C-alpha cells in the first residue's frame, strides 16, 4: 500500500496577510484584499485592481531577514518570507539527517528587476545581477541556500498550475522514496510584464472580480507566496510532527485545447479532479468543499463549472473561489489556495465567493455566498488550472490525532 503523505508545516504571504495568522483573520472579515496599484510603476496604475502585498522592497528585505542587496527580486523576497514561516512551522531545522527537498514554482520570476534595466541592457550589452535574477530558478536557489536545503531542488513553471504541480511532484518523490520530506509551493510578484500581458488578453476586470457570476468580467491579478511542508508516513514517525492534514490525492491533466483557454466542456478539469478523487479512494459525496480555480473569466468559470457537474452529478459539494480575496496569484495560486483549503479543515469554515450576485445560466449550482463557520469540513478539493490546459487538483483530508 502506498505511503500516506501528510502536511506538517505551512507559510504564506499575500495581500491578505504576511503570515498564516494574519491571513486567516483577514478571511474571516469576508472582504476583498484587492486594491489600487502602489508598487508597480505602470500606466495601468489607476485602471486596475490588484492583490498587491502592501510592503515595499526595503520592507520585504527586512521581513525576509536579509540585508538589501542587488540580485534579489520582489518575487524572491516573497518566496523567502513564506518559506521561512513554513520551514519553522514544519521544524525543518531538526532531524537534519533526513533527505529534504525544495520544489518551488514561478513563471514571471525576477521580471521586476529585468524591467528596470531592460533599456540599459539593450544599449550597453551589460549583464548584471538584475538581469541574472530574472531566471525562474534564481528564487529557488536563493531560498534553498538561505535555508540550507541541499538534497534536492527544482523549479516548476506551468503557469497557474505551477505551485499545485510543485506540491504534486513533492508528494510523488516522497512516495517513491527519493526524499523523506519536502517543502513545496510557489511565489509570484506583480510586474509590468505581468499586467500588460494579461491586459492584452482582455481578461482583466477593472472592478472586483466576480467568479461564477453571470456578469463576471475577468481577473484581478495578485502576488504572493506560499509553501507547504510534506512528510511521508515513515518520516512522520521520526520527526514526531503533528500533521495539519493529509494530502489524500492529486491529479494532473494536460488537454492542450488552446494556448490560454480551457475547453468549453471542461474535459481537462474533469480529468484532473477525477484522477485526484480516484487516488484518494474517496467517493464524490465525501468531498465537502471545492476551492475552485474560479478566475472570474467567461471561459474558465463555465468550463470548470461543467467539469464539477460532470464529476459530482446531482450532489455537488460547497463551491467557492477565493481569488476575490487574494487576486489571482498565478504561479503561486496553487499553494496559496492549498493553505486556504487547509485552514477550512483546521477551523471548520468555508470561504465565501465574494461579489457573487446571479448564477451562470448554463450551470445548475451557485457558489457559497456567505462565510460559513462551525461547519464540518473533512475533505477539500483545491483546483489550479493553467494556460495550455495544464490542470491540477489536490485533495486535502482531515487527520484525527
Image (spheres, rainbow, N blue to C red):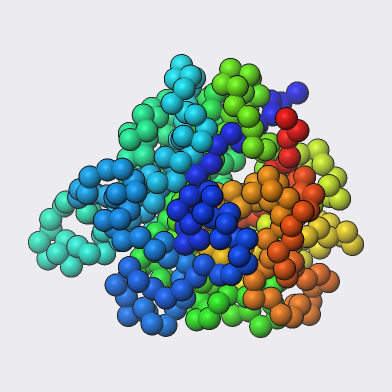
Labels in figure, total: 0
- Image spot of residue 339 (x, y percent): 59, 48
Whether residue 129 is visible to the viewer of this picture, yes or no, is no
| Residue sitting at x 56%, y 60% | 26
Choose top left, top right, bottom left or bottom right for residue 176.
Answer: top right
| Residue sitting at x 60%, y 60% | 27
Residue farthest to the right? 314
- Image spot of residue 59 (x, y percent): 30, 55
Quadrant of the image containing the N terminus: top right
Give the answer, above or below, for where 233 lies relative to 349: above
- Image spot of residue 141 (x, y percent): 34, 39
Give the camera-side residue of 204 and 159.
204
Whether residue 281 is visible to the viewer of this picture, yes or no, is yes
| Residue sitting at x 47%, y 67% | 51
| Residue sitting at x 69%, y 29% | 4
Give the answer, above or below, for where 307 lies relative to 67: below
Q: Is residue 98 left or right of residue 356?
A: left
Q: Is residue 189 left or right of residue 134?
A: right
- Image spot of residue 137 (x, y percent): 36, 44
Residue farthest to the left? 124
Q: Is residue 300 left or right of residue 54?
A: right
Choose top left, top right, bottom left or bottom right for residue 248.
Answer: top right
Give the camera-side residue of 118 and 22.
22
Quadrant of the image containing the C terminus: top right
Amino acid at each position: 500500500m502506498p505511503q500516506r503523505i501528510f502536511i506538517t508545516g505551512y507559510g504564506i504571504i499575500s495581500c491578505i496577510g504576511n503570515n498564516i495568522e494574519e491571513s486567516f483573520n483577514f478571511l474571516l472579515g469576508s472582504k476583498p484584499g484587492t486594491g489600487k496599484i502602489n508598487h508597480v510603476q505602470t500606466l495601468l496604475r489607476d485602471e486596475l485592481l490588484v492583490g498587491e502585498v502592501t510592503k515595499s522592497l526595503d520592507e520585504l528585505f527586512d521581513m525576509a531577514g536579509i540585508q538589501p542587496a542587488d540580485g534579489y527580486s520582489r518575487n524572491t523576497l516573497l518566496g523567502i518570507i513564506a518559506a521561512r514561516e513554513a520551514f519553522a512551522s514544519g521544524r525543518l531545522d531538526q532531524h537534519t539527517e533526513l533527505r529534504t527537498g525544495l520544489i518551488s514554482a514561478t513563471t514571471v520570476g525576477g521580471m521586476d528587476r529585468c524591467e528596470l534595466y531592460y533599456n540599459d541592457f539593450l544599449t550597453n550589452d551589460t549583464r548584471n545581477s538584475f538581469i541574472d535574477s530574472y531566471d525562474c530558478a534564481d528564487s529557488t536557489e536563493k531560498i534553498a541556500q538561505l535555508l540550507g536545503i541541499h538534497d534536492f531542488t527544482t523549479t516548476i513553471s506551468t503557469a497557474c498550475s505551477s505551485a499545485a504541480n510543485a506540491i504534486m511532484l513533492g508528494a510523488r518523490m516522497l512516495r517513491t522514496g527519493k526524499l523523506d520530506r519536502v517543502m513545496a509551493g510557489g511565489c509570484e510578484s506583480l510586474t509590468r510584464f505581468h499586467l500588460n500581458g494579461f491586459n492584452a488578453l482582455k481578461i482583466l476586470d477593472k472592478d472586483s472580480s466576480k467568479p461564477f457570476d453571470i456578469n463576471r468580467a475577468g481577473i484581478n491579478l495578485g502576488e504572493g507566496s506560499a509553501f507547504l511542508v510534506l512528510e511521508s508516513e515513515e518520516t512522520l514517525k521520526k520527526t514526531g510532527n503533528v500533521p495539519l492534514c493529509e494530502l489524500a490525492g492529486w491529479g494532473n491533466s494536460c488537454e492542450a485545447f488552446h494556448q490560454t483557454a480551457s475547453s468549453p466542456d471542461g474535459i481537462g478539469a474533469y480529468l484532473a479532479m477525477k484522477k485526484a478523487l480516484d487516488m484518494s479512494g474517496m467517493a464524490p459525496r465525501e468531498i465537502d468543499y471545492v476551492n475552485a480555480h474560479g478566475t472570474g473569466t467567461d471561459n474558465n468559470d463555465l468550463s470548470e463549472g461543467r467539469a464539477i457537474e460532470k464529476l459530482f452529478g446531482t450532489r455537488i459539494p460547497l463551491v467557492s473561489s477565493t481569488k476575490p480575496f487574494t487576486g489571482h496569484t498565478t504561479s503561486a495560486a496553487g499553494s496559496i489556495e492549498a493553505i486556504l483549503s487547509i485552514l477550512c479543515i483546521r477551523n471548520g469554515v468555508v470561504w465565501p465567493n465574494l461579489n457573487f450576485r446571479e448564477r451562470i445560466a448554463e450551470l445548475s449550482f451557485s457558489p457559497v455566498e456567505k462565510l460559513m463557520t462551525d461547519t464540518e469540513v473533512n475533505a477539500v478539493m483545491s483546483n489550479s488550472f493553467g494556460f495550455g490546459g495544464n490542470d491540477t487538483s489536490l485533495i486535502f483530508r482531515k487527520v484525527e490525532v
